[in-house]
């Protein structure tokens, strides 16, 4: 992301990525760090070639102030023009007429979407905000809630290993200051596969990090990658992932089916058999195996286009709702849907 002139009162930085569940709710994106402090996962191209940087709290606070200035400018026009503070396209147009440089600002569209949606949620970027010192992170959270008091939920990505190493008292403090939800990339609970994909976390790190986040009071959202081990490792991947998830019992479990992507280490090093995709039926069988072994009180979500399977009626087999299916209440229903899909694709 291009950095802007810092003497500009409207200067703020926006990172590229957020979980889909944070885009649908038009979250304010606040960039706490740049890129990923790990950056070795073989399936991931998100921050490849980009250097990780912690941003000083003063810089982040200056970003929040700049966003606050734009929000105030818009509100002032909305109030003055008799629109009772409502953000209409006429208000936005007038603001852009007065500050034409903002037409080229890479983050202003995001800020306007957030304000238009009522200014309720924020997402802290980039890949692992919990790596910041608790003292710095809480300073930022306090300032964010002061400038945007309408915010009701703040979320972030966090790595299991970072969480596993963080003192519990720091996690409680961060949660109590305002960070509500952490999105964690579990990918798999299989020890060999975790090594193979260079996740930098063991199953024990995943369990420790996930449980510590739960105990600190966060809502925890764990992402797993069906198909990550290919056909050869499918069963171990399915069962060990369920085993780890059972130990964490997070609030959300989100399916992100594996796709080999150009630009990733996996893709570049793939042998002739590595790129053989699992068939839709094999993918569904693996997911069935994972879900059948789950003993959790989590919501199971298929909130990504990668969960593409359809049923005999041509419609999506599984709902892509961000809130998913509550387990164990809807476990039998989800397994039956997947069985329908397996029959359909066989
Ligand atoms: S930790 Fe996350 S962002 Fe970093 S390389 Fe792995 S998957 Fe990508």
Image (tube, helix red, strand yellow):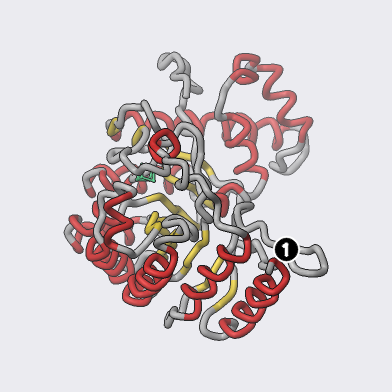
- Report if the beta carbon of the residue with label 1 is closer than 8 angstroms to ligand 1: no
Residue occupying the point 53% across, 43% down: 28
Residue occupying the point 42% across, 41% down: 271
Residue 116 is situated, as x and y percent measured from the top left of the image, at 67, 43
Q: How many marks?
A: 1
Residue in front for this viewpoint, 345 or 42: 345
Residue 211 vs 117, above or below: the answer is: below
Residue 314 is situated, as x and y percent measured from the top left of the image, at 80, 63
Residue occupying the point 45% across, 53% down: 154
89 to the left or right of 135: right
SS of the residue at dot 1? loop
Residue in front for this viewpoint, 139 or 234: 234
Residue 310 is situated, as x and y percent measured from the top left of the image, at 73, 63
Answer with the quadrant where ligand 1 appears in the image. Answer: top left
Image quadrant in which you'd find residue 92: top right
Q: Which residue is mark 1?
A: 310
Residue 65 vs 260, above or below: the answer is: above
Residue 72 vs 23, above or below: the answer is: above
Residue neighbourhood size for the residue with mark 1, other residues' Cα within 10 Å, grouped as few (<14), some (14–19), many (≥20): some
Residue occupying the point 32% across, 61% down: 176
Residue in front for this viewpoint, 147 or 76: 147
Residue 12 is situated, as x and y percent measured from the top left of the image, at 46, 27
Residue found farthest to the right: 313
Q: For the C terminus, give its image quadrant.
A: bottom right
In the rendered image, is residue 288 in sight? Answer: yes
Image quadrant in which you'd find residue 124: top left
């Amino acid at each position: 992301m291009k950095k802007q002139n810092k003497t500009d009162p409207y200067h703020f930085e926006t990172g590229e990525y957020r979980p889909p569940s944070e885009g649908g709710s038009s979250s304010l994106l606040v960039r706490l760090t740049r890129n990923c402090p790990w950056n070795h996962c073989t399936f991931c191209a998100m921050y490849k070639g980009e250097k990780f940087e912690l941003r000083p709290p003063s810089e982040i606070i200056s970003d929040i102030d700049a966003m606050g200035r734009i929000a105030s400018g818009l509100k002032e026009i909305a109030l003055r023009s008799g629109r009772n503070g409502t953000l209409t396209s006429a208000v936005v147009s007038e603001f852009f007429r007065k500050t034409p440089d903002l037409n080229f600002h890479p983050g202003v569209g995001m800020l306007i979407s957030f304000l238009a949606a009522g200014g309720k949620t924020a997402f802290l970027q980039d890949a692992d905000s919990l790596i910041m010192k608790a003292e710095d992170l809480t300073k930022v959270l306090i300032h964010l809630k002061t400038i945007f008091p309408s915010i009701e939920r703040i979320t972030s990505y966090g790595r299991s290993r970072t969480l596993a190493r963080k003192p519990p008292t720091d996690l409680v403090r961060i949660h109590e200051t305002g960070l509500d939800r952490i999105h964690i990339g579990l990918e798999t609970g299989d020890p060999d596969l975790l090594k193979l994909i260079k996740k930098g976390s063991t199953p024990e790190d995943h369990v420790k990090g996930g449980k510590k986040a739960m105990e600190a009071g966060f809502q925890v959202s764990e992402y797993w990658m069906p198909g990550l081990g290919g056909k050869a490792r499918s069963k171990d991947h399915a069962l060990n992932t369920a085993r780890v998830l059972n130990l964490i019992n997070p609030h959300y479990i989100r399916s992100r089916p594996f796709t080999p992507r150009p630009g990733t280490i996996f893709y570049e090093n793939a042998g002739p058999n590595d790129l053989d995709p699992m068939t839709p039926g094999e993918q569904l069988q693996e997911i069935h195996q994972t879900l059948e072994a789950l003993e959790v009180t989590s919501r199971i979500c298929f909130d990504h286009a990668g969960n593409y399977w359809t049923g005999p009626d041509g419609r999506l087999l599984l709902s892509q709702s961000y809130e998913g299916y509550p387990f164990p209440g809807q476990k039998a229903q989800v397994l039956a849907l997947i069985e329908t899909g397996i029959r359909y694709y066989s």
